[in-house]
Amino acid sequence: MKIISMIPARYSASRFPGKLMQDLGGKTVILRTYEATVATHLFDDVFVVTDNTIIYDEIVNNGGKAIMSKKEHDCGSDRIAEAVEFMDVDVVINVQGDEPFTDKESLAKLIEVFKDDHDKSIDLASLMVHINNLDEINNPNTVKVIVDQSNFALYFSRSPIPYPREEDAGVTYYKHKGVYAFRKEAILDFYKLPMLPLEASEKIECIRYLEYGKRIKMIETNVQGVEIDTPEDLERAKKLWK
């Protein structure tokens, strides 16, 4: 089984433009993420795939591998699908470019899902973290996920799900970490299928898989890390890096 990692990297992020080129301990955020992914030694290859020559040059000039997108894309999955369409790979791990604290343990768990899935019944896998902070649960920038008893995703939302009408029901809330593992066939299907209303409303790309009947296996991890979505996140990351 050939397994690679793709790191989609868009320069003009809406909430924090240019965040991937911000300094984090003497190197840019995107370079830190790339190096952390390579350092896991889990992949046959690691690429940054980007729409911007600044990010492309940053990776290549520091000895890394990068691919320039040929088209404009609305989401990272589309960007990855274009890049891997003609590659000889079986599984693709999507590591977000704004997660410089990407850890080996969580990525290894995703890979194991496919090594154990002999009948190829799982289309993709992703990570979730238990959360209990009410501000985080109610924050629309935090994507929540609910799962069935086998930890397959039922739905993702920016709203608190489930809604706590009965506060003593013993519900566990999970935050979705935007790290995905795809079978190549699943991500190419995603690329060819149009966006439907639920994805368009929530602006959460993995909802498209659910709307088209794909199965997403969720893996719980205890590693929170820091996703750099805002300048405040960057300051937290700098403190953690020190």
Image (spheres, rainbow, N blue to C red):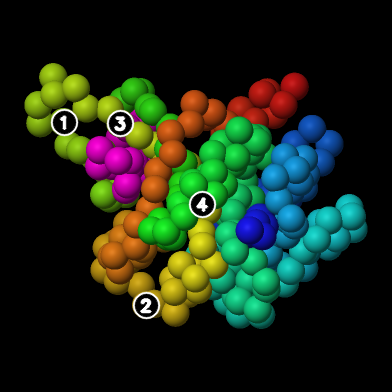
Q: Nearer the viewer, mark 3 or mark 4?
A: 4
Taking the spot 68% from the left edge, 64% from the top edge, the residue there is: 49
Tag shown at residue 164: 1
Q: Is residue 96 visible?
A: no
Distance of mark 3 from mark 4, alpha carbons? 25 Å
Tag shown at residue 194: 2
Q: Amino acid at mark 4?
A: Phe
Distance of mark 1 from mark 2, alpha carbons? 33 Å
Number of residues whose C-alpha sits closer than 10 Å to that of mark 4, classed few (under 14), some (14–19) or many (20 or more)? many
Residue 94, how many percent across, how many down? 58, 54
Total marks shown come to 4
Q: Is residue 157 magenta?
A: no
Say whether marks 2 and 4 touch (CB < 8 Å).
Answer: no
Q: Nearer the viewer, residue 30 or 122?
A: 122
- In the picture, the quarter occupied by the C terminus is top right
Number of residues whose C-alpha sits closer than 10 Å to that of mark 1, classed few (under 14), some (14–19) or many (20 or more)? few
Q: Earlier in the sequence, mark 3 or mark 4?
A: 4
Q: Nearer the viewer, residue 234 or 63?
A: 63
Where is mark 3, residue-wise? 173
* Residue 169 as seen in the image, left or right of residue 11: left
